[in-house]
Image (cartoon, helix red, strand yellow):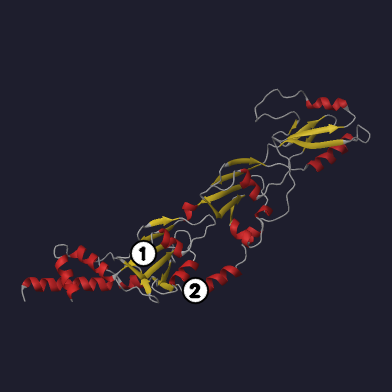
Amino acid sequence: MSSLGLRTGSLLVFATATLLSGCGIAPGQRMVTPAAIQDTGGEFSTEAAQQKQIPITDINLALLRKINADQTSAALPSQTLGLFGKPPIYRVGAGDVLQIVVWDHPELAAALGQPNQSTRNADAIPGFLIDENGDIQFPYAGNMHVAGKDVSTIQRELHARLSKVYQKPEVTVRVASFRNSQVYLDGEVRTPGAQSLNDIPMSLTMAINQGGGFSANADRSRVELVRNGVIYPINVDDLIKRGRNPSQIYLQPGDLIRVAAREDSGVYVMGEVNKPATVLPLRNGSLTLSQAISDGGSFDSNTAAAQQVFVIRDSTSESPQIYHLDATSPVSMVLANQFELQPKDIVYVGQGGLVRFNRVLNLLLPAINAAVTGVVLTK
């Protein structure tokens, strides 16, 4: 045998061993993370490699039943349940303007002063402006602290003070201008910004509707309510599915509502598909494995190994998960259509053995790749 033949045969054996060493992933086994290189000698440490083993879970009917059972039995988080309640009563604050009328006492009407000639929206309308300390001044009643009180309470206190001067005064108090309390909308709504609260309680859905509604890019499953530094996640569609009305979540002054974009929940489809891409979930936040593969252009018929479909979850965490689907099974697409993906999942479609082998040869033996491949194919 010539030296060229010996050299070619040795390289072929080496390449084959390299290929087989990379094909050790199979359902039921464990994927070992790459070995760490030791500082001394630069050699791989087998002990370090065995410290982290990632189990591979098959996507089958038993797994889907378990997932569905867990989702059905899962109760709403206590934080989310705590957001539901009765409509709150509006309490006035600094910047609000009160209209106070004492009937049959026209001399007190002059306390309102002359109509404001300014047309700027930021200017207060005629009335009793609550100052930065939360106080107002009213004739014969003196200085009154009203911030944090509702209209009925202010009316009773004012009546008690005026009763010392007038006999059975009839007092009416209303808020003429609401300028103190606001909530804020951010993210995927058509008109983000601040909204003023008034004596009509504002619910979550009312605030979103007044902001123009969800945008086309909104992820309705990922709405966040920030209150007093605490973030409350809200899945609007899931609440409706459970029979809970999001309109029963009432907002408080200073609340921030943020609607996430669907791009923030994308799933990465890569490997042997026709169009590797970042696939966005539907507007309700759902995305199945079959939808992701379909949006990726389906399998590449020339290179894909349909039995090697993997879903990698929590890849950046300390405890990643790997799910495996054999798409050659007749029921595989039924399973894929019921397997729900999560934001930032990675869907990877593996390669066929011969294609992977050719790529190894292209890497190691570019000069004689065609000749060796020909020998392999003829055998």
Question: Which quarter of the figure is the N terminus placed in?
Answer: bottom left
> What kind of residue is marked 2?
Leu
Residue 191 rendering spot, x and y as whole percentages: 57, 41
Query: Is 54 left, or right, of 205 in this rendering?
Result: left
Q: Residue at x 68, y 50 (%)?
A: 250
Image disc number at residue 299? 1
Point out the tag, 1 or 2, that comes first from the N-terminus: 2
Q: Which percent across, then down, holds residue 297?
A: 38, 59
CA gap, disc 1 and disc 2: 24 Å
Q: In this rendering, does residue 316 appear at all?
A: no
Q: Is residue 325 above or below residue 239?
A: below
Total labels: the figure holds 2
Tag 1: amino acid: Phe
Residue 107, compared with residue 135, is above or below; it is: above
- Viewer-proximal residue among 86 and 32: 86
The secondary structure type at the circle numbered 2 is: helix
Q: Can you tell which mark lies on residue 126?
A: none
Residue at mark 2: 63
Could you tell whether 328 is left or right of 19 in the image? right
Looking at this view, is 182 or 318 the one in front? Answer: 182
**Circle 1 — which element?**
loop
Instruction: Using the image, determine if residue 221 lies above or below residue 122.
Output: below
Q: Is residue 154 positioned above or below 4 on the image?
A: above
CB under 8 Å between discs 1 and 2: no
Left or right: 309 with respect to 142?
A: left
Residue at coordinates 71% horizontally, 39% vertically from top-left? Answer: 93
Is residue 340 visible from the viewing direction of this image? Answer: yes
For disc 1, the neighbor class at 10 Å (few under 14, some 14 to 19, many from 20) is: many
Q: Quadrant of residue 348?
A: bottom left
Quarter of the image with the C terminus is: bottom left
* Residue that appears at 6% across and 72% down: 3
Few, some or many C-alpha atoms within 10 Å of disc 2 (few <14, some 14-19, many ≥20)?
some
